[in-house]
Amino acid sequence: MHRRWTVGALSEMLGIAAPTLRTWERRYGVGPTFRTSGGHRRYTIIDADRVATLARFIEAGVPAQEAAERVKRLAPHELAAIVGGGSEGLRTSGHDQAVFTILAGAKEFDPAKVQRAAEQAIERYGIEEGWDSVIAPAMIEVGLQWEDGRLGVAAEHLVTASILSALRAAAHERPTHGPSRVVLACVEDEQHKLPIVALGAALAKHGHPWTELGARLPMESLEVFVQSSQPDAVFLWSSYVTPPPEDMDRLAAMAQHTRLVLGGTGWPEGVATSHSLSEAVEQLRDALGDDLP
């Protein structure tokens, strides 16, 4: 038999005052959806999960109107996962909703919306988790939708530029001082530099200055710079460009004198790489002798 609750019964079950439940229904449209044969309104289990999730979002600091819009977009199984998953379920849902907002901003050609969503993810979860759980998944989905024609090149560029602004702002909030001990760069022909910008922002959070050499850096230029500056560590990103064997040999020689950390999926099979921003930060902090965590 399906369970149905009156506003009073649901109030007692969830510990939410009945006037609050009525306000949420009136203001935000989050209320009972079932009517008895006599016309009395009742909350279903999905309605109850929706109300419980709305309460959790609000407790987590999400504005009530935004929280209501979020819960109304969630499918029944997503609501159940949040309610059943406790604080972890709420956190995972927050990641998904932030990704949804970035994609919505791309489709609406709204750079402010994209940048705001990225900034809020960074503020709420920190640089590492914000990147690994929100920004990177959003960028992957943008790429997939660009490939199948759902998004155009302009939308992809808009998202990249907006997220770049958010990451730069996060780095500037934590200015670092002293000589740079880390070099961040992309392999030659690699055009996607957002990961190294995110890594620089994360290093700034831990107080480490860095030098960013950007995208499409020729191997010769990297070698000259490293020989001249003698950094403690070098991070090199490749998302899809596989360096030729001779470049891999040169990197192996470089690794004899400085800690070399590789990131991205463009490296030859069997080469050890970091699989997330959090992992790259941990490896670089270890190279710098930083106490972990």
Image (cartoon, rainbow, N blue to C red):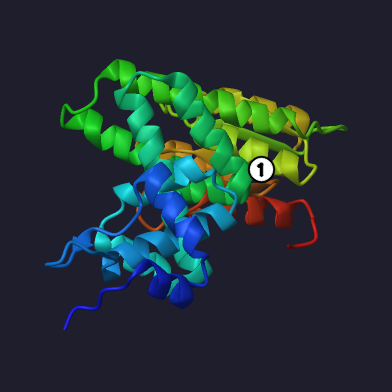
Residue 222 in sight? no
Q: Residues within 10 Å of mark 1 (few under 14, many from 20)?
A: many
Vertical arrangement, residue 221 with respect to residue 197, above or below:
above
Q: Is residue 200 left or right of residue 31?
A: right
Farthest residue, direction right: 178
Residue pictured at 82% horizontal, 33% vertical: 176
Identity of the residue drawn at 67% across and 35% down = 183
Q: Secondary structure at mark 1?
A: helix
Residue 170 point in image, percent of width and height = 66, 33
Q: Which residue sits furthest left?
A: 37
Reading the image, the residue beneath label 1 is 202
Q: Nearer the viewer, residue 175 or 181?
A: 175
Which of the pair 285/157 is nearer the observer?
157
Whether residue 164 sits left or right of residue 126 in the image: it is left
- 218 sits left or right of 282 in the view: left
| Residue 149 image position (x, y, % from top left) | 16, 26
Above or below: residue 56 compared with residue 204: below
Viewer-proximal residue, 26 or 219?
A: 26
Placement of the N terminus among the 4 image quadrants: bottom left
Q: Residue at x 70, y 42 (%)?
A: 203
Give residue 60's position: percent from left, percent from top. 58, 55
Residue 12 shows up from this direction: yes
* Type of amino acid at the residue the image marks with label 1: Ala
Residue occupying the point 80% across, 61% down: 291
